[in-house]
Amino acid sequence: MSLGSQVFQTFTATVTTAGTSVAASPAPYDNTHTVRVRNNNATAIIYVADTASGGSIAATGLVIAAGTYQDLPIRVASERTKNQFVLAIDSDTNGATAVLTYFNAHAS
């Protein structure tokens, strides 16, 4: 994977069909140490998990209530238990969007 070029970078992930998770794109960078998942939706619940996307993660994912956020301290790639961190996003509502902010260690 590559390095994030800025101290923080923000992306969105939209769940087209509730119960069918989508992959964060891009995946967290090698120098991303924290991922903030923000749920700006009015009522939708967002689920997030470190797993392959495609299926429902409602039963196993971290729950992020509407109007809240959660910071995920994933550590930089060289300190992770597995090199590639896979981030799947799901929701209980069609069309819900998660706002992902990657906090990156300085890339020299």
Image (cartoon, rainbow, N blue to C red):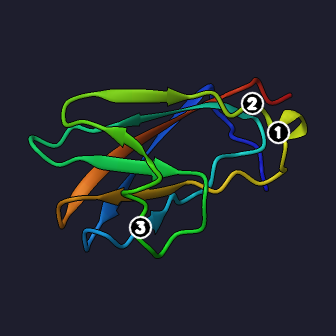
Relative vertical location of residue 35 with respect to residue 22 in this rendering, above or below:
above
Inspect the image, locate mark 1, and give the three-letter code of the amino acid beneath it.
Arg
**Which quadrant, please, contains the C terminus?**
top right
Q: Earlier in the sequence, mark 1 or mark 3?
A: 3
State the residue position of label 1: 80
Identity of the residue drawn at 51% across and 57% down: 24
What residue is pinned by disc 3?
A: 21
Residue type, label 3: Ser
Residue type highlighted by circle 2? Arg
Whole-percent x and y of residue 16? Answer: 26, 71
Residue 28, above or below 51? above
Q: Nearer the viewer, residue 83 or 29?
A: 83
Marks 1 and 2, the one that precedes in the sequence = 2
Q: Quadrant of residue 30?
A: top right
Furthest residue in direction left, as rendered: 42
- Is there a contact, CB below 8 Å, between mark 1 and mark 3? no
Residues at marks 1 and 2 touching, judged by CB atoms closer than 8 Å: yes
Number of residues whose C-alpha sits closer than 10 Å to that of mark 3, classed few (under 14), some (14–19) or many (20 or more): many
Place of residue 47 in the rendered image (x, y in percent of width and height, measured from the top left): 37, 50
Left or right: 57 in relation to 51: left
Which quarter of the image is occupied by the N terminus? bottom right
CA distance separating discs 2 and 3: 23 Å
- Asked which secondary structure carries label 2, the reply is loop
Q: Residues within 10 Å of mark 1 (few under 14, many from 20)?
A: few
2 or 3: tag closer to the N-terminus: 3
Residue 83: percent from left, percent from top: 84, 50
Q: Find numbered disc 1 in the image and state the secondary structure of the residue it sits on.
A: loop
Give the residue number, with chain letter if any, for mark 2: 75
